[in-house]
Structures are given as structure tokens and as C-alpha cells.
Amino acid sequence: MMRKFEELPIFKQSHNLVIKLYKFTETFPDSEKYGLTSQIRRSAVSVPANIVEGLHRNTTKELIAFMYNARGSAGELLYHLLLSKDLNYLEKEVYLELDEITQEILKQLNGRIRSEKRKLNIIS
């Protein structure tokens, strides 16, 4: 029986990252409202949203596909965070913290993808 998605560590961590990013992006310049602020929020929200959607699909193959989507969004977020630091919208310490959390989420996604592929005897 599948646990509630809210109980999964990968969901909790990615959801908490979204909350943090919403707070940090509130301080971004108004000129970035429809630019970088929107992009960061969109890519961050996409991670837990894809995890949840994948868990609610019918097949393991579909779950894997949505985990890949989540991984892609996390990768996109890494760039947005780097750009935010380089534009001085994020302090270096904040950037390093957010980058570390995102990298950990990527590791967890990779582990989940490998685990699900093993169930299907898919080797890559």
C-alpha cells in the first residue's frame, strides 16, 4: 500500500524548498516579478508536483517519467539559483544552502529512479 505522498522524505524536502524559495524571491526586484522570480517558483513547484503526479499514475513507467520531469526541473532550478547569486539577488550563503538542498533532492530523485527501474528490470 502506497504511503501518503506527504510522508515521503523526497516530497517533504522539495515542498520545504518551495516554501523557502517563495520567501527568498519576495525580496527580488519588482522588475523580476515576471522574469526570474516566476521562473524560480515555477521550476521549484514543478519538482514536488511531478513527484505527486507520478505517484498517482497507473504504472511504474509513468512514475519514472514523472521522476525524470522532477529531476529536470530541479536541474533548471540550479541554474536559476546560480543566476540569482550572480545578479546579487541572493547572498552567497543563501545560494549555497539552496544549492545544497537542491543537490540533495537530485540525489534522492536519482535513487528513486534507479529503484523503480530495478522493479522493471531496466538497466541504465
Image (cartoon, rainbow, N blue to C red):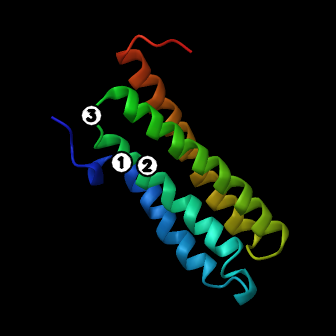
Instruction: Say which of 80 and 97 sits in front.
Output: 80
Contact between labelled residues 1 and 2, with CB atoms less than 8 Å apart: yes
Please name the residue that numbered disc 3 is placed on. Answer: 58
Q: In the image, is residue 21 above or below residue 79?
A: below
- Percent coordinates x, y for residue 114 in the rendering: 47, 24
**Residue at 47%, 55% in the rendered image:** 14
Give coordinates of residue 26: x percent, y percent. Answer: 60, 83
Q: Determine which of the numbered discs, if any, sits on residue 53 in the image.
A: 1
Looking at the rendering, in which quadrant would you find the C terminus?
top right
Q: Is residue 29 left or right of residue 13?
A: right
Dot 1 alpha-carbon crowd within 10 angstroms: few under 14, some 14 to 19, many 20 or more: some
Q: Position of residue 60 (x, y in %)?
A: 34, 27
Q: Is residue 95 above or below residue 11?
A: below
What mark, if any, has residue 108 been given in the picture?
Answer: none
Horizontally, is 82 left or right of 7 in the view? right
Single out the residue that lies furthest toward the right: 86
Which amino acid type is marked by label 3?
Asn
| Secondary structure state at the residue bearing disc 3 | loop
Q: Between tags 3 and 2, which lies in front?
A: 3
Q: Amino acid at mark 2?
A: Asn
Residue in front for this viewpoint, 65 or 96:
65
Looking at the image, tell me whether mark 3 or mark 1 is earlier in sequence order: 1
Identify the residue under disc 2.
Answer: 50
* Helix, strand or loop at mark 2: helix
